[in-house]
Image: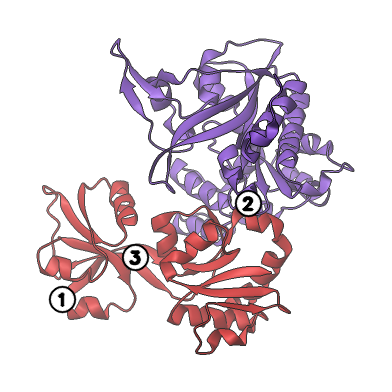
Amino acid sequence: MLIDDRVLSEQERIGFRLRALYADNGYERYRMSKFEEYDLYSRNKDFLFSEGVITFTDTNGRLMALKPDVTLSIVKNGRDTPGLVKKLYYHENVYRVSTAADGFREQTQVGLECTGAVDAACVAEALRLAAESLKLCSDQFVLEISHLGILSAFVDAIAPGEKVREAILACAGEKNLHGISRVCRENGLTEGAEQGLVKLLGLYGSPRAVMPKIRTLAEEYGVEDCAAQLGQAVAQFTGGEMEDRIRIDFSATGDLKYYNGIAFKGFISGIPASVLSGGQYDALMRKMGRKDHAIGFAVFLDLLERLE
Amino acid sequence: MLNVALPKGRLGEKVYGMFARAGFECPALMENTRKLIFDNETKGVRYFWVKPSDVAIYVERGAADVGVAGKDILLEYRPAVYELLDLNVGRCRMAVAAPEGFQDNLNRTLRVATKFSRIARDHYASVGRDIDIIHLNGSIEIAPILGLSDVIVDIVETGTTLRENHLAVIEEIVPISARLIANKSGFKFKTEQIERLCGEIRKEVEAL
């Protein structure tokens, strides 16, 4: 039976196009059950986008949760595949606390996860698919990319304690350079200790303009390998039609307890928040007893409502 | 066109002065009119006055590309915005104040009256003190006088109101001033305009 796609909303149409994009690139559909044991989420609360999970007691007495996240479920239910790469995509509803709704809200996400022997080619593919996903939504998009290995080396160089480090990372995510200086001052850190990080955060723009400066800075901090990974990941866009849509921006951060390596966020003109978020999350894999590497991203379809 | 949300009132007028001196003037803004939105197309800016506590909402939701909000509002509501510049105006402090001679009894839950529940909760959580938050919307100083609370957490500028009511600052939580904030998505698509504005205003801040 042919479906007349005029009956679909723009969000639904984009959702199906994204699924086709991922399937065409060798990703298999992952279907998760509506409920997971609450324990999975309670142990990884910080990984969730919002606090609060809808829970209920199942008939067998187990405390269950209505899924607030897909990645955790994929990581939990997957098995390590040494030497192989597992590529999955999903199109699921998740249930999260929304400050805008002042309560729980159902949100639709389409995304992909690549786990296993994730190498530079897999990282580059994830970034390409992220950019293509945004382009499917609108020509007016920006994909901003950072490397958490570089960011964390610069933060480590100035901040000794966990609390100070967290405060500095929060400022980095807000492009709050005066805030970083203030945190350093209040914690008695050497004057000017933050200059390297301030310089790094000031470097945002097209990879062509920014990468040479990042390589020089990375050498000073001994993270040339991370700069090389970042350079390799963005090189595919050089000279291509999406080149002017790609930005390096170290304010694209993530929780370092879960994320490492490449991190990225996608924006569409006219939509006030990021519509795509992703990155490498080997740290989450280790936390959940997995040896595989992983990268993935999600597109938040609800935010695309404004495109109509 | 860059949409700029300014806080209504004395602080907003002072901040607009900085924007104007930085080359982003819009004289109609200071005229006594009922207009709400003011354009200066040649300068590429559109201003609007909003309630100070609403600036961050306009910016977070993308109705304004940039705006000026107090750090107190940013700490309390934690909008997902970029905080680009400390404008160093509207300076005051978020502090804990109590009746003169107050001694904290650690055996009792501390009753804290405030408009800034989150800031108060975070502050006392960081020192492990058990508190009871009493959320008020104004005239906070009256709460400990009437026995509604033990202390208050509020903005202190000169301290005159506190002194007149026999209250005193017992602890400073964080210094407050006006900040230039930007919408995260807007920043990606109007980078040059926002950077230029930010750069010129930075010069004004340094000249203060």
Q: Colour of chain A?
A: purple
| Sequence-earlier tag: 1 or 3 | 3
Subunit ID for the residue under disc 1? B
Contact between labelled residues 2 and 1, with CB atoms less than 8 Å apart: no
Which is closer to the viewer, label 2 or label 3?
3
- The answer for how far apart the CA atoms under marks 2 and 3 are is 28 Å
Name the residue carrying label 2. Answer: A197
Q: Colour of chain B?
A: red
Give the x, y percent position of residue B134. Answer: 21, 57
Colouring scheme applied when the structure was drawn: by chain
> Local crowd at mark 1 within 10 Å, few (<14), some, or many (≥20)?
some
Residue at x 62% of width, y 38% of height = A9
Taking A254 as reference, is A4 left or right? right
- The answer for how far apart the CA atoms under marks 1 and 2 are is 45 Å
Which residue, as the protein is rendered here, is positioned at the far bottom?
Answer: B32
Give the x, y percent position of residue A155. Answer: 58, 45
Q: Which mark is residue B4?
A: none
Identify the element where label 3 is drawn.
strand
Taking B26 as reference, is A234 left or right? right
Task: Please name the amino acid that badge 3 sits on.
Answer: Met
Identify the element where label 2 is drawn.
helix
Check the image and report above or below for A258 versus B48. Answer: above
Contact between labelled residues 3 and 1, with CB atoms less than 8 Å apart: no
Residue at x 75% of width, y 41% of height = A135
Residue at x 55% of width, y 25% of height = A71
Give the x, y percent position of residue B29. Answer: 56, 84
Name the residue carrying label 1. Answer: B166
Subunit ID for the residue under disc 2? A
Which is closer to the viewer, label 1 or label 2?
1
- The answer for how far apart the CA atoms under marks 1 and 3 are is 18 Å
